[in-house]
Amino acid sequence: MLFALPALAGLLMFVAIPFLLAIGLAFTNLRLGSPLPLEFVGLTQFLRLFADDAFARALLNNLLFTLVVVPVQTLLALALALLLNQPLKGRALFRTLFFMPVVFPLALVSVVWILIYAPGPNGMLNSFLQLITLGEWQPRDFLHDPWLALPAIMLTSIWQGAGFQMVILLAGLQSIPEELYEAARIDGAGRWQRFWYITLPQLRNTLVFVMLVTTILAFRLFEQVQIMTRGGPRHATTTIMYEAVQAAFSRQQVARGAAITVIFFLLVLLVTLLQRRIAREERL
Amino acid sequence: MSWRRLVSMGLSYAALLLLAFLFVSPILLMLTGSMKADARVLVEAGSFRAFLPLDVDLQNYRDVFARVDFGRYLFNSLYITGMVVLAGLVVNSLAGYAFARLAWRGRRVLFGLVLAILILPLEAIAVPLFYQVTLFGWRDTYLVQIVPFIANAFSIYLFYTFFLGLPRELEEAARLDGAGVLRTFIAIIVPNSKPVFATVAILSFLSQWGVFLWPLMVTSGEAVRPLPLAIATFYTLPPLQWGDIFAFGVMMVLPILLVFLFFQRWFIRGVVATGIKG
């Protein structure tokens, strides 16, 4: 007990208590530096949030981000892992290169990608798109375009995160027993059949896990938005966490921030339970 | 080798090379840009010159030090990360050991709670924690960036699973020699558990080096701010000079990149360890 005491005290003090505090504060009117007395206001904060256009947009943006980034990033990571799971020369080097963006702090990644998305024909992405469309592409100002700002943030996030999933999937691929493939070969199964009937089912739990982690990361989306777009243009890239920080930190509305936190937690809990359920079905 | 195999290998290499270029180009852009005159960074971003370090000019690096106190931010990041990693190794390994190997009342219930906490990301408690440390009067300190992050449920879990797998004979021999629990832990368990210590150290280094949200909320002055926050501010500092920004970026990523390149095996193993949880 004594051995576990420091860690338990830390978790109690800085995780459990704040978590309970969030639930409590969400039902009050707490505002830092406000002259109003602290009051219990019931569901007012939640009702206000759901009536707020910016917050509705934040929920929608997180949902869109998840729906695009999770499948695209997982498929890309799976493709990379499958490519690297062959007996090729130089695979260690390729693995290093694909994993490298993962160690880059998101703040730095965001700043570098601002230049990639620079407007005008000199911008890196603009000229690249002009090159591959043979000059058809009209230069755009990606981060100030209401339709392109969120996709731009998605692309940046996929670039930064794919390597992380790749190494987990690669480990999953390497743990599939070779005998299964041998047996399939003897039965005359082609490459595609082996992938469909052996690789995918064997990799299922790993894939479910990887998608869960990416989904939760998608809900946490913050740095890229804060640095690249400040939630704009006109809330086009705002997110749950961006709204929470805006409320609690920039506007001192701690109670509103706490209410957003509670909603955020419920979403994460929902996704986790869903993953447990899908992963468990497999064992039956 | 058959033709079919050769073609498939050729296609694999072509795909890998193309993807590798796409993955590395932003990094090359930064590295190359950090070594050329500010005005040329943006102008040449659209040409092959963006990726080839044709000239090596360290003026941008000197400019960073002239414009901001880079050394200060670097120290802050190293200090905060170092303290969280080191204290975390001690505190969480002891807890993992207590849960895995020692018999005490309430062990099961408390471990269940630790597992429940695993799914709580920092974001889920950032706002109330911000309020709590404001009450403590901890804002704008190193303390507020270190203490809340020492105890970590996931680290405890990693230590726990590793210690469970160690043979019991190790400890029994030490106990017979009359060593106490703490002594057994330090002299027998720790030296036999290097892989898990390396994994936990690397994972917490990786997540700590990039922290942005929390220091943004709890620090306002430059004195205790870490590098990720500093580069976000540096980017907004007029005049906008991309060469300087990239030089800042290269210097800020260098420590973690070096650790990654030297300890790559452990890095990958650490990341894979996060996948075992499912």
Image (cartoon, coloured by chain):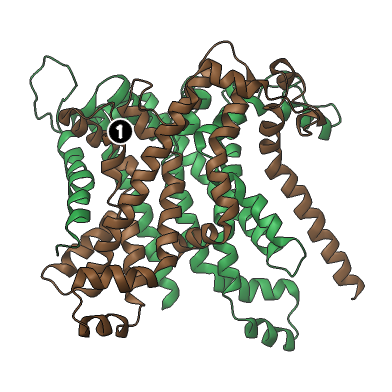
Q: Amino acid at mark 1?
A: Tyr
Q: Looking at the image, which residue sits at the far top?
A: B239
- Is residue B278 among the parts visible in the rendering? no
- State which quadrant residue A121 falls in: top right
Chain drawn brown, letter? B
- Is residue B49 among the parts visible in the rendering? yes
Question: Total marks drawn?
Answer: 1
Few, some or many residues within 10 Å of mark 1 (<14, 14–19, 20+): some
Residue A145, relative to residue A18: is it above or below? above
**Residue A176 versus residue A243: which sits nearer the camera?**
A176
Residue A279: give x, y in percent of width and height.
43, 67
Locate the N terminus of chain B by quadrant: bottom right
Q: Chain of mark 1?
A: B
Residue B204, relative to residue B8: is it above or below? above
Residue lying at 13% horizontally and 71% vertically, measured from the top left: B104
Chain drawn green, letter? A
Q: Looking at the image, which residue sits at the far right?
A: B3
Residue lying at 77% horizontally and 64% vertically, measured from the top left: A89
